[in-house]
Image (cartoon, rainbow, N blue to C red):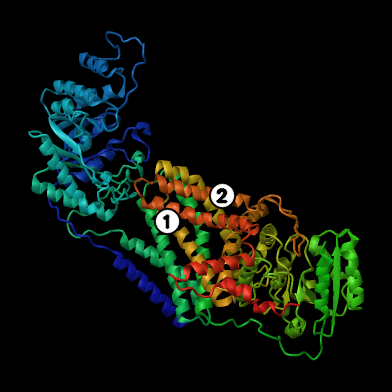
Amino acid sequence: MRSVAVVVALVACLHAGAWAVRQTQATAPNFEGVLNSVSYSPFTTGTHPDFEGSRPPEARIRADLKAIAPYTRAIRLYSSTGGVEQVPKIAAEFGLKVTLGIWLDKSEKRGEGELRPDFDPSCKNRFEQEMSDLLDVSCKSRNIREVVSALDLLRKNRNVNGIMVGNETLFRRDMTADQLAEVVKRVKREVAGAVPISTGEIYSELLETDKDGGLVAEKLISKVDFIAAHVLPYWGRIPAEGAVNEAVRVYDLLRRTFPGKHIVIAEFGWPSSGYNRGAAIPGKFEQAGIMRGFVARADALGIDYNLIEAYDQPWKTIEGSVGAYWGLFDNQTRQPKFAWSGPIIDMDNWKIAAVAVAVGVLLSLPVLGIAGATFVQIFLLASAAHAVGAWAATLFDYWVSHYFVAGAAFALALGTVLLIPLVLIALGRIEEIACILFGRSPARLLRGSGAGAPPSHPKVSIHIPACREPPEMLKATLDAVARLAYPNFECILIVNNTPDPAMWQPVEEHCRALGERFRFINIPKLEGYKAGALRLALAQTSPDAEIIGIIDADYAVTPDWLSDLVPVFADPKVGLVQAPQDHRDGKRSPLHYVMNGEYAGFFDIGMVQRNEANAIIVHGTMCLIRRTALEAAAGWSCDTICEDTDLGLTILELGWQAHYTNRRYGYGLLPDTFEAYKKQRDRWASGGFQIIKKHWRRFLPGASELTGDQKREFAFGWINWLGAETVGVLVAILNLIWVPVVAFAGIAVPDKVLTLPIIATFVISVVHFVALYRRRVPIPPFQAAGAMLAAMAMQWTVARAVANGIIKDHLTFVRTAKGGAARRRVVFPAFEEAVLGGLLALGAVIVFATNWERVREINLFGCVLVVQSLPFLAAAALAAFENSRLNDFVVLRSLEARLVEVLSPVLPIRRNPISQTAAAPDKRMEAAP
């Protein structure tokens, strides 16, 4: 315990050290003076000011201006109505000059043919009438009100130092350059030289030329008193390190183009958050370094400038992800984002680091309870816990440092809720990797005979339920039982709901020929499916039988099954012993080969690990159960379609011990087709969800004899299997719905919070599969790769089964077609998966193709869509492969030979698993009868 605590503490210290190293310090020129001017808007909410519905309160404006007054000489406004008209008077209290703004947009014009009165009754004077005629709008329109209000503010406030008539009006195409020039002309006439007049415009609009090479805005430029150019390198895709040089380059270009005109960089800034635009990457460090560097350079060169902007403006959603983050002050705390002198540091880094380390330590606490763990095992588990802590801290940082409207907050919360189970599952898989690769060897695994030869051989009653099974297959199963090297057993074959005498009469005769130990029972109509048959068999069991053995109708057991495992029951605490499933027809086709490999992973990895906590899943066939334990559990239950797992869990809840061996003692038949394979998995998943609904109360404290480790194993198993697949499908569908928003609105999900964890969990799943298969499952690489594909292909099947389990209380037991009993398929068995996989892949293509700015978050979202499409496409590929010529070992061998012939001259060719597969059967299969 002490050594484990030391390792956990060591990892926590390393994590804290990593955050300390991450505390990057950037350098930039110090600025000790006062800024020329800063843009200011008094609106703070996420709603556009036009729809806010209330004037900004005077007290908030006063507090804002008081906070920024020590940093700047002047402020620039963008409108003169809607409450902004309060600003000049309050700014005078703090000695701030004010550049007024007149907001001009596409006001609704009079309809064609509508009467234009000689004098608009809504106009108050000749000037308003002139503006009404010029703009072809009513004097009640916003444009007229903006102009009138600005002129009124100029007359009433001595601290006004200029008026900006319009802001990026040309860029928005709200007016032509000539129209705007006329407005500037009329305003200048009214101002009569009291203050300089200009218009704020993107510099490229001022430099635009017509087909003859003349300036489009030449008339406008002739009317303004100075050039007020917006130079925002971010929108030009300029990298952060070149932003200041770009601004100086543009300034020099404007000076050369407009000699004699005073040039003002009326907007310069850099966003502190949001998506990249090409090589331009927003960020806190970038913003601080660029703003300090620009101001120092501007002061040195004598450049007149205005910085955008004082406070973050969450309502600027029209500018995309960066719109809200151009401020020098945070919108919520109203505090500066960075210092203007000294090293540039992230002042919130220590808070985020504290959250990360705290969550990591909290998630590491369960590691302290692992007995006998190795150093590497503990180190890996604690590191994984701290990685999740770092993700939680990143999520916390994103939440507190971003502005959300209700929809965005809901989307983030939903995404986080859906990711939490996936993250927990990833942690569980890392724990399994650590335990199997670096931990102790299994201690409870039965590796041979249980406890030596007992003084007496307790009687075993073997029950074989059969419904519409091929007679020859049943005969083979009975013959294998007859060869058991155990002296004291009986065998009860229960044929139910099989009306065709040709299917059961030969079997009845065969039982009679095998002797009195074999009993044949035929029930034409029996309710309760397989559980009903087993309940009937238990009622017909000999009174002296102490152990019940269960095998499926297709299973051929090895002679040493009972002689090896029955001795384990010498311990009176043992309630059941489970042996794994395996199959004797795995070489029927390449598809069956990979299906068998997929089954093997569960029995060689998952069951072995669960056995260490006495928490195995009973899977019916190849199971031995103490009769008293079976009766104590009230026998086989008919209220679930996975009666075997239900019974096994009930026996464990009563406090019995269960044991497992991964040695193969029996070989059955694989599902005939991929469709049958899916139906079997659907039944298992549906039944598993039924079991959760039935047993969850017994996991409450004191409700059963289950230990904490057993509860953990079952809970994690359900989350890992049912939860991972279901949540994975749900997240994929939600992302698919989100594709148009990302592709055409440019709104992606935050990468570190939502997309990277999805990719990380997928990578962990692949590593988990590959590493544990290599360590525990003795199959060739070709089969293991196919097994991974088959496992992925079941995602939609499991998710749909869980959905059915949620909606429906009563589910139908569906037999798995084996032994050639499956009918020829009529429809493509993976149609739904093909549609979903195709849509996700198409969505990824659309996202990549429309990401003109190469936004990192959008590209990552496209990668997530690709990852999420793989399980669906895997199902479609296997379904298509099943009926193709490639689903034949002979064809694959010929293709392999041809490939070797073509590539051997240029590439070193190693032995191919396909050749090995065709040449030598699996050693574990050779013992099968």
**In the picture shown, does residue 166 fall above or below 742?**
above
Please tell me which of labels 2 and 1 falls first in the chain: 1
Residue topped by disc 1: 753
Q: Residue at x 20, y 37 (%)?
A: 203
Quarter of the image with the C terminus is bottom right
Q: Which residue is drawn at 27% across and 21% down?
A: 144
From where the camera sits, is residue 208 visible?
A: yes
Q: Which of 510 and 272 is in front in this view?
A: 510
The spot of residue 281 in percent (x, y) is 29, 52
CA neighbours of label 1 inside 10 A, class few (<14), some (14 to 19), many (20+): many
Q: Nearer the viewer, residue 612 or 510?
A: 510
In terms of secondary structure, where does tag 2 sit? helix
Residue 836 image label: 2
Q: Residue at x 40, y 57 (%)?
A: 752
Identify residue type, mark 2.
Leu
Q: Which of 734 and 291 is in front in this view?
A: 734
The spot of residue 700 in percent (x, y) is 63, 65
Q: Which of 113 and 96 is in front in this view?
A: 113
Residue 108 image label: none
In terms of secondary structure, where does tag 1 sit? helix
Horizontal relation, residue 794 to residue 196: left or right = right
**In the picture shown, does residue 867 fall above or below 180?**
below
Identify residue type, mark 1.
Val
The single residue placed furthest to the left in the displayed view is 260
